[in-house]
Image (cartoon, helix red, strand yellow):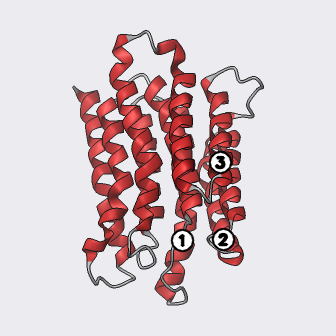
């Protein structure tokens, strides 16, 4: 049982990330096929952990696959009209939030959770995209992937602290997937064989960001002991790549580490809030 958990939660997603990087470099970062492949790998990871969904979907766990699939489709279809695509994805996520939690709308105690998740949707939809468009995006190619890694790790820990182990594993698996991608790029950077570049296109970034947010919606709605403030604070991680220019002229090999430390600030704060919530 433990070996199966490690295999599905860590090893296979890590291998997916390790494979995705050379495929992306071969086909081209901006190639929509690489974005589609990233989305399909995320769905595959999720199904490995949660099982294939029924149709029509019966539970929130089944609905997640359809929501992520819809987000992938709209992101790719509106890749040339990104503003329109972002707006549609925002509305789709809001609709997904209502679809997942429709039976909890009448519960007044759920209002803080819905508000926190609405904030998370806004940050995940818009901030994650615009953060990669800063003028140093080519120089800070690690900024957005590291941001996504921190969000996934933070969401996994918050889910675990909220007594929702299943989605803690799912978010941890996505973190392993992103981590495998970053690992290859960082090794090549240390060896001096890789030039600074954008590691994720805006389309790929959006697909992964929205997939992570979708998983966090389920955590926010159904985790027994989740803290809404922790989820909202975790969303601030999405804006951290915007501050990468403050690193000045740091060495290119040191820059990913410094970016990671910056992105870890709101992530660590959200985890601390979740932990203190349990102790209180």
Residue 80 bears which disc, if any?
A: none
Q: Is residue 246 left or right of residue 189?
A: left
Residue sitting farthest toward the top: 106
Q: Distance of mark 3 from mark 2, alpha carbons?
A: 17 Å
- Mark 2 lies on a secondary structure that is helix
Q: Please name whichever residue, 188 or 122, is drawn nearer the observer in this view of the structure.
A: 122
Q: Are marks 1 and 2 in contact (CB under 8 Å)?
A: yes
Q: Distance of mark 1 from mark 2, alpha carbons?
A: 9 Å
Residue depicted at x 54% and y 62%: 202
Q: Is residue 165 left or right of residue 109?
A: right
Q: Horizontal and vertical percent for residue 130?
A: 42, 59
Nearer to us of marks 3 and 2 is: 3
Q: Please name whichever residue, 278 or 193, is drawn nearer the observer in this view of the structure.
A: 193
Q: Horizontal and vertical percent for residue 28?
A: 66, 75
Figure check: 194 above or below 130: below
Residue depicted at x 67% and y 60%: 16
Q: Is residue 21 left or right of residue 141?
A: right
Q: Residues within 10 Å of mark 2 (few under 14, many from 20)?
A: many
Residue 72 bears which disc, if any?
A: 3
Q: Horizontal and vertical percent for residue 228?
A: 33, 30
Residue indicated by mark 2:
24
Residue depicted at x 46% and y 57%: 129
Figure check: 14 above or below 73: below
- Mark 3 lies on a secondary structure that is helix
């Amino acid at each position: 049982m433990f070996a199966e958990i490690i295999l599905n939660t860590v090893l296979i997603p890590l291998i997916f990330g390790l494979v995705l990087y050379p495929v992306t470099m071969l086909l081209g970062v901006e190639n929509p096929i690489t974005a589609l492949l990233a989305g399909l790998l995320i769905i595959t990871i999720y199904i490995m952990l949660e099982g294939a969904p029924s149709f029509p979907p019966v539970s929130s766990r089944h609905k997640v696959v359809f929501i992520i699939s819809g987000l992938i489709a709209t992101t790719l279809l509106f890749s040339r009209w990104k503003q329109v695509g972002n707006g549609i994805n925002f509305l789709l996520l809001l609709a997904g939030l209502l679809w997942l939690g429709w039976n909890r709308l009448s519960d007044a105690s759920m209002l803080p959770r819905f508000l926190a998740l609405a904030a998370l949707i806004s940050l995940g939809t818009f901030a994650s995209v615009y953060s990669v468009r800063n003028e140093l995006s080519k120089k800070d190619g690690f900024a957005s992937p590291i941001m996504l890694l921190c969000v996934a790790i933070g969401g996994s820990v918050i889910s675990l602290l909220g007594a929702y182990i299943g989605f803690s594993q799912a978010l941890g698996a996505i973190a392993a997937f992103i981590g495998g991608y970053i690992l290859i790029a960082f090794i090549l950077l240390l060896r001096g064989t890789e030039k600074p570049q954008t590691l994720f296109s805006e389309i790929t970034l959006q697909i992964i960001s929205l997939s992570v947010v979708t998983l966090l919606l389920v955590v926010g709605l159904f985790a027994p002991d989740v803290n809404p403030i922790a989820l909202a604070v975790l969303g601030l991680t999405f804006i951290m790549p915007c501050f990468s220019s403050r690193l000045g002229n740091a060495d290119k090999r040191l820059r990913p580490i410094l970016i990671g430390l910056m992105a870890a600030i709101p992530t660590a704060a959200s985890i601390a809030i979740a932990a203190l919530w349990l102790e209180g």
